[in-house]
Image (spheres, coloured by chain):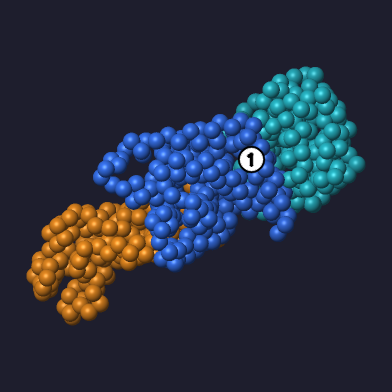
Chain colours: A blue, B cyan, C orange
Amino acid sequence: MTDLLRQAWTVARKDLLLEFRTRTALVSALVFTALVLTVFNFGRDPTAVATIDLAPTILWVTFTFAAMLALNRAFQLELENQALEGLLVSPLSRTSLYWGKLLANLVFVALVEAVGLPLFVLFFDVPVGRVLLPLVGVIALATIGFVAVGTLFSALVIRTRFAELLLVVLLLPFLVPPLIGAVQVTARLLGGRPLSEAAGWFRLLAAYDIGFVALATLLFPFTVDE
Amino acid sequence: MLSAEGLRHAFGTGGGRVVALDNVSFSLEAGQTLAIFGPNGAGKTTLLKVLAGLIRPDAGRATVAGGRGAIGWIGHQSHLYGHLTVRENLLFWAALYAVPATIRATRADATLRQLGIADRAEQAVWSLSRGLAQRAAIAKALIHDPPVLLLDEPFTGLDLAAAAEFRALLARLQGAGRVVVLATHDVGEGVELATDVAFQRRGRFVHFAPRGARGPAQIADEYRRAVGEGEADD
Amino acid sequence: MSLAQTGRRITLLGLVLLAGVYVRALAFTPLERFQGPAQKIFYLHVPAAWSAMLAMGLVGLCSILYLIVKDARFDRFAAASAEVGTTFSLVMLTTGPIWAKPIWGTWWTWDARLTLTLFLFFLFIGYLLLRGAVVEPGLRARYSAVLGICGLVLLPFIHLSVYLFRTLHPQPIVLKPSAPSLPGSMLVTLLVSFAVFTLLYVGFVTQRYALGLLREAQGKEHA
């Protein structure tokens, strides 16, 4: 087990090192997030609908789009560097490869969210102070769900023609349960409602995460082995 | 140390079906170097990929003592990350191949010296010339001191001097506990290094024997007769 | 009798019986008290949704079996089932609004069944798009199988999400026609309709499967 994790970390570390060397994907994702939040601001009528009603949706749509940008890089990177074959020839277990990529993707998306959330609070003047901890918790739960399925699917589309587009089309139905859960919980948190009201949604998010991380781990070898 | 039993593999279906491996069986012991000659499309790469565990054959089995960790692979792809330095690449692969952390750095340095690129260790791979990048790729294949070497058309793109250097390196590496399998379409390369010779045509071994006393010219002759001149299988 | 012929015969039988169901539903089944004649589309709408679910279930099952056994027949069946499922979903998604408009005054509603079928439709389309995008047959079969299994596992989560959503956001009063206590003759019509749609499913899939076999033998890819 520790070997598995250690190898996963080796892969993740290499991905993150490469990402920080080039920085293009990260910076693009950050700029994209800021832009989307800005557009949302101009796309609404502040007199008609209270910000607090729209806020969860705005936050989560932004995070979803940003996550999608991040997902393609994972395996595209290997293909571009002609390294995927090398990874498969090595004793690296397929599970470690998946977890390594998952981990790198999670760190990447977490960074984008860490910048996106304060921007969101700033642009929309939303009070998150008291509920920051559970809010971060929900963000983490939902993100794990998106990224787990997204990492698996990104391996499916690497050799196809419109990889980025196909990834989005395949992934969106799978993003709906965590998205709904995240929006519902966020709405309750921002609305000052007691956490217990959102208990069902939390359970949904957790079940989704466990279910799909397990399923993706199980299915991943089929996407890379011949 | 390395064996193949009844390997069969085909790609595609119906009218587009291509047989890449057709009942290939052989085994190699430590110290043997097998050179497989065959035209493009004969199935050489497929055979190597099956030996490396990259492809699961439709039928038959391939076994390499020590599993994937015992194999050093040199093929068409560089397996190097452009934006990492040569040393960073080597350290990464060394970690994946379970080279103990304490000796990783020394092993990397030693391999770089062996390939004559120690002075380029801190250079990013994308900035290396083709020849140097190729040497870095070879360094990656050797970083874990593998007992089995699988080489798929390793002379591609090497000029005469580089090819001679590579041949010299192989001569140093082979023998004494190593198994080398070298696949190429050019009979001129690597014949002298081989202890055993095989001709592959349309997925089959139409010849498999120790090289014995045969010289390059003789082998080339036999190859031409067995396989035909210059035609590809695909 | 070849597979294609068998398929055609079953489909033909199914279509004839479907006409029979129509007749029975329109002429021989009593009118529902609150919804009137428009309610009768329910006898087509619900079984179509069921067939789409069946199609998805079989795509998922065949995907699992394919990954275990690597038999190309499972892959072919899954592909055929996905195409048929797309059709049935589309039928359901178009009859839904046609029924909803007179009953609820709106073309679309996010009720559980319509929502689930919409997701089924998206999953099927995604599945077919993936198949279209991957050229090599072995790779295509494996990738589709992975997607198929994920799709199957997603369904309970969609169902759960919709359920949770609706208990918190009740829709305006709707008369859901899936009341368990359906009077005798309505129940019979419904059950017969289920059987007919299942028969149609079998017929269509058989034909599509046979077509897939034919195209493969000719070396052409099938989606």
- Within the image, what quadrant is residue C202 found in? bottom left
Instruction: Note whether C126 is above or below C161 in the view shown.
Output: above
Name the one closer to the observer, C22 or A129.
A129
Instruction: List x then y, in percent, for residue B82.
Output: 66, 30
Q: Is residue C49 visible?
A: no
Total labels: the figure holds 1
Residue type of the residue flagged with mark 1: Asp
Q: Who's the residue at 25% across and 45% down the image?
A: A48
Q: Chain of mark 1?
A: A
- Within the image, what quadrant is residue C39 found in? bottom left
Q: Who's the residue at 54% across and 33% down the image?
A: A27
Instruction: Note whether A117 is above or below C87 in the view shown.
Output: above
Using residue B144 as the reference point, say whether residue C99 is left or right of it. Answer: left
Name the one closer to the observer, A180 or B180.
A180
Q: Secondary structure at mark 1?
A: helix
Using residue A78 as the reference point, say whether residue A196 is left or right of it. Answer: left
Q: Is residue B161 visible?
A: yes
Instruction: List x then y, in percent, for residue A135.
Output: 49, 54
Q: Which residue is mark 1?
A: A15
Instruction: Note whether B153 is above or below C143 in the view shown.
Output: above
Q: Quadrant of the N terminus of chain C?
A: bottom left
The residue carrying pointer 1 sits among few (fewer than 14), some (14 to 19) or many (20 or more) residues within 10 Å by Cα, namely many
Q: Residue furthest right?
A: B176
Q: Who's the residue at 70% across and 45% down the image?
A: A10
Instruction: List x then y, in percent, for residue A178.
Output: 44, 55
Q: Who's the residue at 36% across and 39% down the image?
A: A40
Name the one closer to the observer, B7 or B157.
B157
